[in-house]
Image: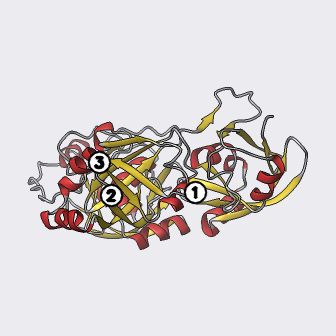
Amino acid sequence: MKRTTYFNSIGEVPDLWPIKKALTLSDVDITHPFLTLPRQQVETHIVMYMTPQQQDHLRAEGQVGLNAQDDDNGDLYLMKLKWRGSYYNLIGKWGKIVRGKGLDVGNEIKLRWFNCCLYFSVSQQQQQLLIGSAPLAPVLPRMIAAPPPLLVYDQSQWPIRKVLTSSDVDPSHPFLPLPRKSVEDHILDHWAPHERERLRKEEHVSINVRDYDTGETHGMKLKWRGNYYNLIGKWGNIVRSKGLGVGQEIRLRWMNGCLYFSVLDELYAETGSANDNWPVKKALTLSDVDINHPFLTLPGKAVEDHILFYWGPGAREQLRTERQVGLNARDGDTGEMYVMKLKWRGSYYNLIGKWGKIIREKRLQVGREIRVRWENGCLIFSVPQ
């Protein structure tokens, strides 16, 4: 049966319960006890606030143990959050919760993450209607300030936006210039007066920078350069690892003492035709053709939809646990075979092993289009002349 999920929109004032879902038939099936939650909701409102150790464990093992508390009665459960690709499952004691609370299809469950614990609640009014019991004493709301939600596709929540230029993605000049007014209005405005004074005196300040797409945190510096500010320190690594290219848009915001950034996979073009022999097409970036750091960056969605989709469970599990898998790759233009590796890097994948040799032999350059597909247990690629 198709799973249907309903979520309410986030208003201007942060909701105490940022995740709300109408329970489906599969959610209340005690023979297969798990609660299904969409990936975007979980990563925005739960995973984002976990400790770095929990996030690393989730990425490496595909699941992580957590404490879950019933906000209606105070019961505490030891459960697990399991990654299933485009969604997550909450497992462990869910069958007991379904039975104990008498949950049924259509009930609304509300969830939030606070102080390293997953809280959940089910409307008392809905339960009364289902079980026909006498009215229960109202449960007073717990006035706990929920962390502000960060929505990747919400325009207003990313106040700083910039289209990357050729100098921005040049690994030999690793810094990202940002306009002075944008930095002062949307970053420095959140700093304490003594931090702003320190920036004026020393002309640079160390800050924590977090890649919202992968969860990776970098120690970097914000340097004042008159009419603009430079973000320096690890920018060259970010350009190479994410395969950033000219024309991509980077979005930034300051929140909870940290500078967050996100870059959409805009250079990846997924073809619309089901009959296309090359479902993944990408314009090569500067980092893709850098023979000093030879790897090809491919967006996570493209790989998962058109490569991992055809793998067996064993290969996918190996990729999740070991973060890389060996594979055969064939040049569709010449027929030459290579033994390479596909490495998982969070929201994207790197193809490594012989990529430097391929760059030299095919004389690949920025802007050339590479096409990729999976066929008969082999990764086929082609670069049209």
Secondary structure of the residue carrying numbered label 1: helix
Amino acid type at mark 2: Leu
Distance from Cα at disc 1 to Cα at disc 3: 27 Å
Q: Is residue 266 above or below residue 97?
A: above
- In the picture, which quadrant includes the C terminus? top right
Identify residue for label 1.
240
Location of residue 47 (image quadrant):
bottom left
Instruction: Please state the horizontal and vertical placement of residue 370, each as a whole percent of the image.
Output: 72, 41
> Of callouts 2 and 3, which one flags the residue occurring earlier in the amino acid sequence?
3
Which dot marks residue 227?
Answer: 3
Identify residue for label 2.
259
Lateral position of residue 296 relative to residue 196, left or right: right
| Residue 117 shows up from this direction | no
- For disc 2, the neighbor class at 10 Å (few under 14, some 14 to 19, many from 20) is some
Distance from Cα at disc 1 to Cα at disc 2: 20 Å
Q: Residue at x 80, y 53 (%)?
A: 360
Distance from Cα at disc 2 to Cα at disc 3: 20 Å
Foreground tag (1 vs 3):
3
Instruction: Please state the horizontal and vertical placement of residue 246, each as a whole percent of the image.
Output: 54, 41
Pick the front one: 156 or 106:
156
Foreground tag (1 vs 2):
1
